[in-house]
């Protein structure tokens, strides 16, 4: 064993502890960085070679320390779980936000909704029945009827404009998916290169995880680890990113380039070098949530509203045509609508108050039996209550699910943070430990120096 | 979930999360406080929303029934007053007829005076029969004209019922057919008064006697009609009472479903405030220290 081996051992300790302090300093610097995963330095003692040369014998007592690697403290399983829960979370969150907005436009129960307008409309017919000769009472009926038609139209329009907004959101989200996917493909390439030439890929891996998480939030996609350290991402089983190649997600049907609805359900496809593949329905994430809203939830409510508009118009028209107006002529249809969009186009067909068929007998008298019948003609209230009840139940259920999912998501995030988060106390301690180790190694150097000084400069010197 | 490591980020995240939860609970209670309602949107309770909508609809109906019944009460009151007045006038005419019949010695001048008064009564009775309520003749059925009888005592109304809906599915007739109250055209009280006046002027004792009998029958008819009107008025008044009772009951039910229990909300609010302040204090304490505070 060489006389100077101790110096090298001390030097290795100095090097190792410098790295330990660097790592601690890096962790502290990134304590607030989004997506940062804490690193720990792994030291390994340098000792006897595993396979000494034949007949040789290792006589040292250890040759110090060296850095075996810098570990990134993450757990692949926890990451997969977190991506899944975040995908579910954003699916539910977007549904909750949109449905709550639609719900607040309904205005039930209260004095300004459709139910109140129906009650007012019937009351106006009662007043007309009490006073069939009065033009004021007749005008009141027409006014209330217009209010009722407007109340239904406003709801239909609210849903229509919400659907329009959400179609724009899909367009924006799809564009973001494609940007993130190509970023991920580029990151995959960099990771492969870094792994090949042996540089530290930690920052790239952090970025890879963040991009994969964002893709999951947007589409509920799944990421699988490649042997070169990158991620392959598939959306509902259709590959989007494979290695350093990113496909393009696009809307196949449902939205015109101008952002309007083309009448079909919204579907997606992914185009890559191998061609175009349709994405099966049932995506999660934000795009999945909005797609389900646009394909199922909002159309169902619109259909309910349409059915109510048709029922209202049919019942009122039938009864109105059974009566006779002020001049004694048979009643005309009261409401008109466009069958393609009943709730959005419901209007009062009559303009002249004298055309209201209050009388049940022809000839122009002041009989009011038909007005009384009109006041009780509509069974639409019960249908409307069912519609509102169904919608309210749906919103309540989504709100509950989103709250539950929030608990689950924050639990998983908590577990990840436990493993990957930076604790300042811990880092301070490891920094202090490295500092002291560094000081001790310096002291070793000093001691060795003095020993060698004694040996070289003082030994055998006589005065 | 066992916690193995705790990091500063976890502490911050949890503190912010807890503060948000506390704030959102506070916001919910604050909404209940400021609106005074626990039912602010359908999803707050879909079932209660349906109840509230049904109750509101019933309340609107009941209010309208009350208005209808009040209107009907006006009609029936007007008819009752008209019939009372008509009864008095017919009674007066009958007295005059008795005077004309009893006094054989009465001279042509006196009979002429009697006849003139009978003519006056007849004119007054036609006015009474044309009584109107809010511009509609109450004895004219569903006529769109302003009169039930023309000045000659001929019925010009249109027979037909004027009904008021006073409760779910129940209507009350609030007019009286003029011919039912005053007799059919040709045999009406106006024809009898006309005949009496003619008989008085002519000194036709047999005619006067016949008129007396006819007028007695007319009075009976008016009284019978008045009884019928009185019965209907009782029904209408009962309906008014029932409507106002139901309205009260329904508004109590609606309040039970929709409105917030204020003392409870206030206590809850206080509790949530305490919890919120506690989490604020905890956040302030927990975010402060780190090991660095205790090293030189």
Image (cartoon, rainbow, N blue to C red):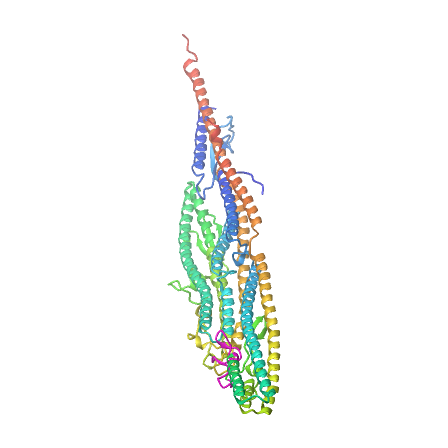
Image coords of residue B173 (percent x, y):
57, 76
Q: Against A56, is A341 above or below?
A: below
Q: Against A56, is B84 above or below?
A: below
Residue sitting at 45 percent across and 81 percent down?
Answer: A327
Q: Which residues are magenta?
A: B128-155
Determine if the magenta segment contains residue B164: no
Q: Nearer the viewer, residue B250 or B91?
A: B91
Q: Against A317, is B217 above or below?
A: below
Q: Quadrant of residue A443?
A: top left
Q: Quadrant of residue A268?
A: bottom left
Q: Against B119, is A336 above or below?
A: above
Q: Nearer the viewer, residue A324 or A101?
A: A324
Image coords of residue A157 (percent x, y):
43, 64
Q: Nearer the viewer, residue A244 or A209?
A: A209
- The number of numbered discs placed on residues in the rendered structure image is 0
Residue B32 visible (yes or no): yes
Image coords of residue A136 (percent x, y):
45, 71
User: Which is the main secondary structure of the residues drawn in magenta?
Assistant: loop
Q: Quadrant of residue B51?
A: bottom right
């Amino acid at each position: 064993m060489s006389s100077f081996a101790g110096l090298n051992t001390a030097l290795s300790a100095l090097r190792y502890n410098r790295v330990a302090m660097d790592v601690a300093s890096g962790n502290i610097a990134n304590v607030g960085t989004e997506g940062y995963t804490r690193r720990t330095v792994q030291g390994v003692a340098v000792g006897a070679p595993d396979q000494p040369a034949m007949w040789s014998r290792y006589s040292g007592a250890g040759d110090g320390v060296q850095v075996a690697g810098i570990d990134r403290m993450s757990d692949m399983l926890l990451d997969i779980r977190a991506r899944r829960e975040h995908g579910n979370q954003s699916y539910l969150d977007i549904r909750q936000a949109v449905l709550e907005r639609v719900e607040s436009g309904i205005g039930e129960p209260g004095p300004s909704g459709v139910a109140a307008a129906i009650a007012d409309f019937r009351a106006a017919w009662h007043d007309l029945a009490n006073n069939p000769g009065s033009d004021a009472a007749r005008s009141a009926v027409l006014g209330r009827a217009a209010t009722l038609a407007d109340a239904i139209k406003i709801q239909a329009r609210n849903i229509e404009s919400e659907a329009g907004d959400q179609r724009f959101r899909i367009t924006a989200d799809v564009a973001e998916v494609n940007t993130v996917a190509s970023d991920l493909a580029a990151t995959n390439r960099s990771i492969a290169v870094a792994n090949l030439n042996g540089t530290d890929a930690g920052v790239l891996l952090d970025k890879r995880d963040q991009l994969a998480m964002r893709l999951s939030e947007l589409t509920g996609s799944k990421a699988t680890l490649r042997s070169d350290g990158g991620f392959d991402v598939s959306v509902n089983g259709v590959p989007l990113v494979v290695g350093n190649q990113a496909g393009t997600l696009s809307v196949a049907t449902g939205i015109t380039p101008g952002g309007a609805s083309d009448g079909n359900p919204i579907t997606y496809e992914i185009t890559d070098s191998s061609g175009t593949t349709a994405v099966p329905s049932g995506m999660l994430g934000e795009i999945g949530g909005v797609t389900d809203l646009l394909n199922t939830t909002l159309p169902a409510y619109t259909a309910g509203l349409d059915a109510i508009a048709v029922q209202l118009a049919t019942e009122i028209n039938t009864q109105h045509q059974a009566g006779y107006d002020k001049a004694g002529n048979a009643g005309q249809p009261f409401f008109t609508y466009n069958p393609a969009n009943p709730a959005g186009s419901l209007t009062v067909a009559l303009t002249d108050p004298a055309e209201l068929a209050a009388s049940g007998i022809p000839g122009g008298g002041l009989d009011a039996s038909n007005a009384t019948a009109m006041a009780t003609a509509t069974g639409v209230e019960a249908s409307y209550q069912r519609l509102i009840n169904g919608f309210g139940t749906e919103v309540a259920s989504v709100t509950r699910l989103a709250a539950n999912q929030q608990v689950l998501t924050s639990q998983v995030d908590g577990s990840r943070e436990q493993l990957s988060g930076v604790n300042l106390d811990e880092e301070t301690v490891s920094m202090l430990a490295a500092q002291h180790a560094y000081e001790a190694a310096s002291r070793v150097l000093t001691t060795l120096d003095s020993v060698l000084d004694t040996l070289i400069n003082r030994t055998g010197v006589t005065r | 979930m066992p916690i193995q490591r705790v990091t500063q980020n976890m502490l911050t995240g949890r503190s912010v999360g807890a503060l948000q939860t506390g704030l959102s609970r506070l916001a919910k209670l604050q909404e209940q406080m400021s609106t005074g309602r626990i039912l602010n949107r359908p999803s707050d309770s879909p079932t209660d929303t349906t109840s509230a909508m049904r109750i509101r609809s019933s309340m609107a109906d009941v209010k309208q029934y009350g208005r209808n019944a009040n209107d009907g009460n006006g009609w029936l009151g007007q008819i009752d007053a008209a019939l009372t007045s008509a009864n008095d006038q017919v009674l007066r005419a009958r007295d005059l007829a008795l005077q004309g019949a009893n006094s054989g010695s009465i001279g042509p001048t006196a009979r002429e005076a009697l006849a003139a008064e009978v003519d006056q009564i007849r004119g007054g009775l036609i006015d009474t029969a044309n009584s109107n309520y809010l511009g509609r003749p109450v004895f004219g059925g569903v006529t769109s004209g302003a009169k039930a009888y023309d000045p000659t005592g001929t019925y010009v109304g249109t027979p037909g019922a004027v009904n008021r809906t006073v409760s779910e599915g129940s209507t009350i007739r609030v007019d009286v057919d003029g011919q039912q109250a005053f007799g059919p055209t040709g045999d009406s009280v106006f024809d009898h008064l006309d005949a009496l006046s003619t008989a008085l002027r002519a000194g036709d004792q047999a005619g006067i006697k016949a008129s007396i009998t006819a007028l007695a029958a007319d009075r009976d008819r008016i009284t019978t009609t008045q009884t019928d009107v009185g019965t209907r008025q009782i029904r209408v008044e009962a309906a008014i009472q029932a409507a106002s009772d139901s309205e009260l009951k329904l508004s109590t039910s609606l309040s039970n479903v929709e409105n917030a229990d204020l003392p409870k909300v206030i206590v809850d609010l206080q509790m949530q405030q305490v919890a919120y302040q506690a989490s604020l204090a905890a956040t302030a304490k927990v975010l402060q220290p780190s090991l660095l505070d205790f090293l030189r």
